[in-house]
Image: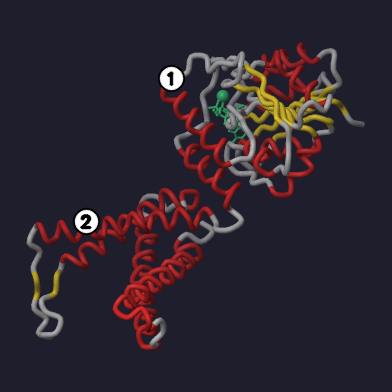
Amino acid sequence: MSVDISVIIPTYNESGNIALLLEKIQQVLSAHSYEIIVVDDNSPDRTWEVAQSWASSRPAVSVIRRMHDRGLSSAVITGMEIARGRSLAVMDADLQHDESILPIMAASVLAGECDVAIGSRGAAGGSYGEWSRRRRFISFVAATMARIVLPVQVTDPMSGFFVISRKVYQDTIATINPRGFKILLEFIGRSRSITIKEFGYTFRNRVHGETKLSGLVIKNYLVALYDLRFGKYVSPTFMLYAFVGLTGVFINMSGFALGEFLDFPHVASGITAIDPLFLSVPFGIQLSIISNYVLNNYLTFFEKRYRGTGNLTGFLLFQLISMLGLFVQFSVFQLLQGAELFLWLEDSRKFLNNGIGIIIATITNYYLNLNVTWKGR
Ligand code: GDD
Ligand code: MN
């Protein structure tokens, strides 16, 4: 049997908030056909227990206690999978979202006025409450970028407070990326054509518990935006990797400059043709290998990163693969030079050949690092 509104509430350590929130939702929805689904990831503070005892005498409320999965977006999807509603609402458990606009948001979706109703801090009638300038700025930048990348206008694309129609859910669920915080962005970005309506509300301060949002959210958000728009062409992980590689070029060059500035020795090898050997060159190379490793570990492959002494293994593998990369680039260059291709380029030919070598080595190194250094850790 279906209901009009399914309210999905992801929780993690919200034992101080959940009972009050459930009470409030019941009040505002009392005249509607609804259900509430709390999805808790086995919170250490036993939020699930509080919710379960509340649900035991109320058939409209159910609680899922997930033992093996973690994460806001995936919790929302777990809730949606068992939801029976014609509209699906999502809301934080920490009382920061204003439940009093929930009925009009759902009504708007149910009446077909829109496919997605967003509770928005940035829309008319809404406000960020007592937010710091820094958080407002981040939120503004995020909204502007979403506007550029996505085909729709949204003032608060990071909102965790929204209602979608069952149709939006059905059309997008197969392609949704269930990682991270930006589940609304996924629904909007993966729909073909949707109408959105925003409903202003004032963001309240948290009273109990603390936020689970970390600085990483910003990186994940950018990656998600990129993935929605260009992900089908080139994977975001590769883009991050290539970006790190680019920073490595600057480090490499700076290391060389530093070495020269500090008068690193120019060594005689005895082979007249190549003497003297500038030690600043390997110095720059090594510096860039180190910085590339650190950046890849904390940016590109953050979720699979090495920690503490594990970095010794990680770095050793990365170093070996980097040396292999030098060899790949060198070989490709020599092969192309010998193959006498692009002869019409005359003197510029060597640059093209070296460029191709760099691109091929970047790609082979990427796959090696993906499948060896940071493989399924
Ligand atoms: N099940 C589950 N698992 N729930 C989680 C998890 C998790 O790993 N992490 C967070 N939650 C729940 C919290 O308990 C809360 O109910 C809700 O998800 C939002 O988490 P908060 O930690 O309160 O996030 P926030 O208030 O800092 O962030 C809000 O604003 C962001 C953008 O400004 C949220 O609305 C985000 O969704 C939003 O992106
Ligand atoms: Mn919150």
Question: Do we see residue 74 in this rendering?
Answer: no
Q: Identify which residue is drawn at 26% across, 63% down.
A: 286
Examine the image and state in which quarter residue 111 appears.
Answer: top right
SS for callout 1: loop
259 shown above or below 130: below
> Which percent across, then down, holds residue 61?
79, 24
Amino acid, disc 1: Ser
Which badge, 1 or 2, is on the more N-terminal residue? 1
Amino acid, disc 2: Ser
Examine the image and state in which quarter residue 354 appears.
Answer: bottom left
Examine the image and state in which quarter residue 333 appears.
Answer: bottom left
Question: Do we see residue 118 in this rendering?
Answer: yes
C-alpha separation, residue under disc 1 versus residue under disc 2: 38 Å
Residue found at the far top of this picture? 27
- As rendered, which of 197 and 75 lies closer to the eye? 197
Q: Identify which residue is drawn at 43% across, 49% down.
A: 299
Q: Is mark 1 within 8 Å of ligand 1?
A: no
Left or right of 188? Residue 5 is right
Q: CB of mark 1 within 8 Å of CB of mark 2?
A: no
> Which percent across, then down, holds residue 10?
66, 30
What is the number of the mark on residue 189? none
- As rendered, which of 73 and 306 lies closer to the eye? 73
Q: Identify which residue is drawn at 47% across, 53% down.
A: 301
- As rendered, which of 306 and 325 lies closer to the eye? 325
What is the number of the mark on residue 254? 2
Which residue corresponds to mark 1? 132
SS for callout 2: helix
Residue found at the far right of this picture? 1
